[in-house]
Image (cartoon, rainbow, N blue to C red):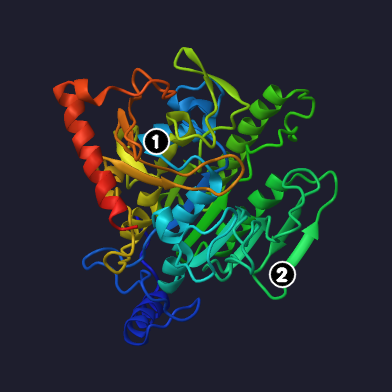
Amino acid sequence: MMVQPVLPLRLLLFVSAILIGLFGLSACGADQEGVPTVSERSNGQDPRSPNIILILADDLGIEAISPYGGTRSTPNIARMAENGVQFGNFFATPLCTPSRTRLLTGKHNYRNYEAFGYLGPRERTLGHSFTEMGYATGYFGKWQLAGIGALEGTGAMPHTAGFQQNLIWHLEREERGSRYWKPRLASTSAAPPNITVHGEDVFGPDVLNQAVLDFIEQHKEKPFFALYSLVLPHDPFVTTPKTPYADNDASKFDGMVDYMDHLVGNILSHVDSLNLAEQTLIIFVGDNGTDYKVVSEFGGRTVKGGKGQTIRTGMQVPFIAYWPGSIPKGHHYQHLVELLDIYPTLLEVSNISAAEGTLDGVSVYDALLGGKHPVRDAIYMHYDPRWSRWEERKFAFDERYKLDDEGNFYDHLTDPLEQNALDVTGLGDDAKRVYERLSTVLANQHAHQ
């Protein structure tokens, strides 16, 4: 059962909405042309919208964890799936920055992606949307969006991106430091930024996890939005406080996945202890596929991580939602969903509106409530990371087939590594219909670029 707000909060939200609507005021700065501005909540619903904790794992494909059939035990993430909704065909881009800019802004990369490790400082984000509606907002974990590539100037900082409180790894362009042992962590919650290099016996993921727990405790009496951007299990592969004797990359990665699950468990337990579970939507997602150096046992076969590559293992990642009392237990949604869909989904969950045409994803709120109907019949990706060896790719795909802008048509059921493109002149009726539909998706998207 959701808790009604006390009168002062309801008045604050009402007055804020009026000010935003009349004057374009924003808690994070002036309005920006062509970006979603929150204006109102839907009628007839609880004005006290839920707390939201969005947990983003770093380099984690579905094959790496137990709810999807992996052999590594992740009991806390499994608990979320068993008591919530698990999305079986959820996709992100194959690399972190392209995915993170899509997640934060709800836009295709061709609309705003400029460089690896960079988010434009004037981009509208989830943080802005929730701040404007009276939420406390926090960002904790990997940032890496202020600029590390060839662009001059500084990209977005957590506080300018709408996150009032933050503790992050990799703020500065030139100096990132460690994210694990002896971590270098920064906060831009106050000026100037506070940067701390911790001792050699301090494990960065513990410090960041405690910051999330403190944020939840601090804001338990009002709606809050926390984006918890885990640094785990990205390389370098290291020992953890639970696996101090791991002595090779494989055992270290296993230990890092186990520790990631432990940190997720801390969040679940803390929310429970504060009696906030029924008021809090917790989402667990991945940003891209597992590191290509990692091998997993999955579905009776050996699977190599696909990070960076536009094959299935580079893009198919977990999406699990947990909200006791509001969403069904053990619901499996098997239709297509992608990272762009998170932004509009969270807005609908929270009764927040965005200007039409500013977001490229579609809400899957109905699926959260147990719906089984598809919300999309294809996913389009413009993938141009401008980093390392990864080349530009434009393609569209559904649950089985993929078509790229060079005309290559693949059947992922029989050719998951995309080694043999299909002869499009000899397609069966079903495959031909999919080919034509994906061709239309590509043409429509290219017309906007």
- The residue positioned 63% from the left and 58% from the top of the image is 214
Residue tagged 1: 83
Residue tagged 2: 193
Left-right relation of 205 to 21: right
Q: Position of residue 175 (x, y in %)?
A: 76, 57
- The residue positioned 59% from the left and 47% from the top of the image is 387
Q: Position of residue 46 (x, y in %)?
A: 29, 64
Q: In the rendered view, would you say 417 is above or below 328?
A: above
**Which quadrant holds residue 36?**
bottom left
Which of discs 2 and 1 lies nearer the camera? The answer is 2
Q: Are marks 2 and 1 in contact (CB under 8 Å)?
A: no
Q: Which of the image's four quarters has the C terminus?
A: bottom left
Q: Nearer the viewer, residue 216 or 170?
A: 170
Tell which residue pokes out farthest to the right in this image: 200
Left-right relation of 114 to 403: right
Q: Amino acid at mark 1?
A: Asn
